[in-house]
Amino acid sequence: MLILGIESSCDETAGAVCKNGEIISNVVLSQVIHKQFGGVVPEIASREHDSQITSIIQKTLDEANITLSDIEAIAVTYGAGLMGALLVGLNYAKGLSIALKIPFIGVNHLEGHLYASFISFPNMKYPYLCLLVTGGHTQIWEVQSPGNYVLHSTTIDDAAGEAFDKGARILGLDYPGGPEIEKIAQNGDPEKYNFPIPKVKNNPLNFSFSGLKTALLYKFRELSQDEIKTNKRDIAASYQETILNTLLRQLANVITLTGIKQISIVGGVAANKRFREKADILRDNSNTEIYFPTAEYCTDNAAMIAVAGYEKLKEGVYSPLSLKANPNLALNDGAIG
Ligand code: KG4
Ligand code: ZN
């Protein structure tokens, strides 16, 4: 079965084709216009999606060496994300579905991130733990079976990706902040500065990142311009290290709590190479299997949407044309299964 996947929930306009669950094309356009504003401007994101989606889908089909008439179903993100941005992809998919007389299926973006693991590791078995780390979410889920998710941990304020983005802004780096911090941190000393690992009183398994961002801001105010210039790489490395240590510490706690030894780490922050190195240490110490999708499937893409859609379609699940975009969709809302 040939499925066209479409993703437009934030600032990536993306298309992918999967053939019986295997990705045969994957095209992502990241909207660079937001860099000048230091973050995504929703109205501009919608307009950019609108002007680019047709050419991105054409490119996706060309890369797969097929035409629109070969497509048998369309999978599209309908939430979570920015309302205007979601509407562009969702309406485009509905239009294609009507014109081509083929089914379409709405996919939860977060569930798409989860399914990215299966692109790289098709034989992953249930149950497993999933650390979902994006620009808007930082959560640890127990994935018991397809569509059955139990939440063990979530952030009470900023997401880890947001901590990277806000930290980068303080450091005078571009948006998105994660890859920028990672780049300069490569030659920095992660032990030089001590940032507090944030703790959450009521639920010790939860995350909190807003205090860390404030600690970075205070550090910046404390240092002279010269000190900042000379030590920027060390500050970035120490800040990154604290975010990653926090993520891995909570993951280790949930592993201990559940006894589940198979882990996937997904979402944009999972593209971070230092994260992967550090996870190797946890893997060895806790005798676990830790799977990261390849980096192109960690940051927003349509391949993960096409594959999640394929799993739904195999179960005979389709969406009605009345399906509405839902900016606040949670992972366990309308899950597969
Ligand atoms: O999953 P994603 O592409 O979009 C959302 O669904 O939010 O995640 C975007 C987030 C951004 O905050 C970005 O700074 C972060 O992922 N990110 C990274 C890296 N690449 C993207 N964070 C750390 N290291 C990276 N290499
Ligand atoms: Zn995402």
Image: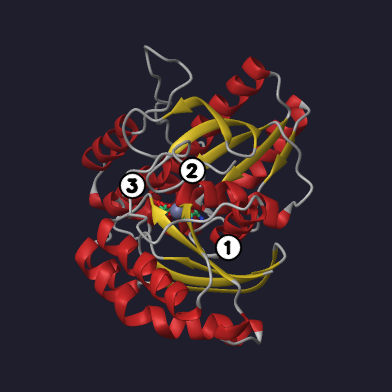
Q: Is mark 2 within 8 Å of ligand 1?
A: yes
Residue 211, above or below 330: above
Element assignment for label 2: strand
For the residues labelled 2 and 1, the Cα–Cα distance comes to: 20 Å
Mark in front: 2 vs 3 = 2
Closer to the camera in the image, 152 or 328: 328
For the residues labelled 2 and 3, the Cα–Cα distance comes to: 16 Å
Give the residue pinned by disc 1: 306
Circle 2 crowding by C-alpha within 10 Å: few under 14, some 14–19, many from 20: many
Give the numbered dot on residue 38. Answer: none
Q: Is residue 197 left or right of residue 85?
A: right
Q: Is residue 186 left or right of residue 166?
A: right
Closer to the camera in the image, 13 or 283: 13
Circle 3 crowding by C-alpha within 10 Å: few under 14, some 14–19, many from 20: many
Give the numbered dot on residue 133. Answer: 2
Q: Position of residue 205 (x, y in %)?
A: 48, 20
Give the residue pinned by disc 3: 167
Element assignment for label 1: helix
For the residues labelled 3 and 1, the Cα–Cα distance comes to: 33 Å
Check if mark 2's residue and mark 1's residue have beta carbons within 8 Å: no
Q: Amino acid at mark 3?
A: Gly
Residue placed at 33% from the left, 54% from the top?
A: 324
Element assignment for label 3: helix
Residue placed at 62% from the left, 24% from the top?
A: 252
Q: Amino acid at mark 1?
A: Ala
Mark 2 or mark 3: whose residue is earlier in sequence = 2
Closer to the camera in the image, 314 or 47: 314
Q: Amino acid at mark 2?
A: Val
